[in-house]
Amino acid sequence: MSTTVIPVTTPTGGYDVHVGRGLLADLPALLPERARRVVIIHQPSLREVAEQIRESIADTGRKAFAAEIPDGEEAKTAQVAGFLWGVCGQAEIGRNDLVIGLGGGAATDLAGFVAASWLRGVDVLQVPTTVAAMVDAAVGGKTGINTSEGKNLVGAFHPPIAVIADLDVLAGLGANDVAAGMAEVVREASSPTSVFSRSSRRTRAQRSMSPATRSVSSSNARSG
Ligand SMILES: NC(=O)c1ccc[n+]([C@@H]2O[C@H](COP(=O)([O-])OP(=O)(O)OC[C@H]3O[C@@H](n4cnc5c(N)ncnc54)[C@H](O)[C@@H]3O)[C@@H](O)[C@H]2O)c1
């Protein structure tokens, strides 16, 4: 399977979402040269993967550290964020360095928030490992943690420098987790604001135009 690269535009620039198989082996090639120290924030189920990534980054001459967090929502707390700020301090993560979020949406939300808040913002590279995180949580730059009053009440918008969705890691997931993620894909695809709904509205509108109008309309779309 070849790699698909989906560019995402943000007000401050943009980043690429890489989708394919075997992408984690090439992860070090996607790191910015300026990043000399890297903290990999991962869920317990991704311990081995995190260690492989840590070793491959260390092989490039960088200092790489793995930080394990509690599973699921237990990780999205001020206490765990505080623990990770401590890890960043001890790892001497500086302005040019990098945080990697490895895991489901709970891990990418937390890693993004820690990256957004450490030194008022360092780069984050997201490596989602559930379907839900690949199609939603890790893409878009929304990061956050929970408080006792509710979910995602504290956070920041902090787009990643890249998202790496390696489909090989999904092999470790149960059928229910994959189905739950795919349900999210269907829900999003059928919402009135989704890219699918917009493109099918466009197609219907184009079908109802005369051929001359359709040709003007599609050349406008290309130049716009
Ligand atoms: N930021 C956003 O825009 C956004 C959008 C949607 C959801 N979210 C957040 O995402 C979180 C839910 O994400 P989720 O559904 O991925 O749940 P999750 O992160 O809790 O992961 C679910 C379970 O799968 C395990 N797991 C992860 N990857 C695995 C793998 N490859 N193999 C085996 N097990 C694996 C995890 O350890 C965990 O037990 C919520 O906190 C939600 O608020 C954020």
Image: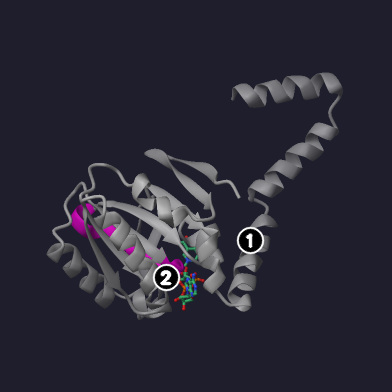
Q: Quadrant of residue 63?
A: bottom left
Q: Is residue 113 above or below residue 215?
A: below
**Label 1, residues with CA under 10 Å away: few <14, some 14-19, many ≥20:** some
Residue at position x 50%, y 65% in the image: 169
Which of the labelled discs sits on residue 185, or is there none? 1
Say which amino acid is labelled 1.
Val
Q: Residue 211 location, x and y as percent?
A: 85, 22
Q: Which residue is mark 2?
A: 106
* Left or right of 1, for residue 151: left
Q: Are marks 2 and 1 in contact (CB under 8 Å)?
A: no
Q: Is residue 199 above or below residue 115?
A: above
Residue at position x 55%, y 74% in the image: 173
Disc 2 CB within 8 Å of nearest ligand 1 atom: yes
Let me know if residue 115 is in the magenta part: yes
Q: Residue 119 location, x and y as percent?
A: 18, 54
Q: Residue 213 location, x and y as percent?
A: 80, 21
Is most of the magenta stretch helix, strand or loop?
helix
Q: Which residues are magenta?
A: 103-120
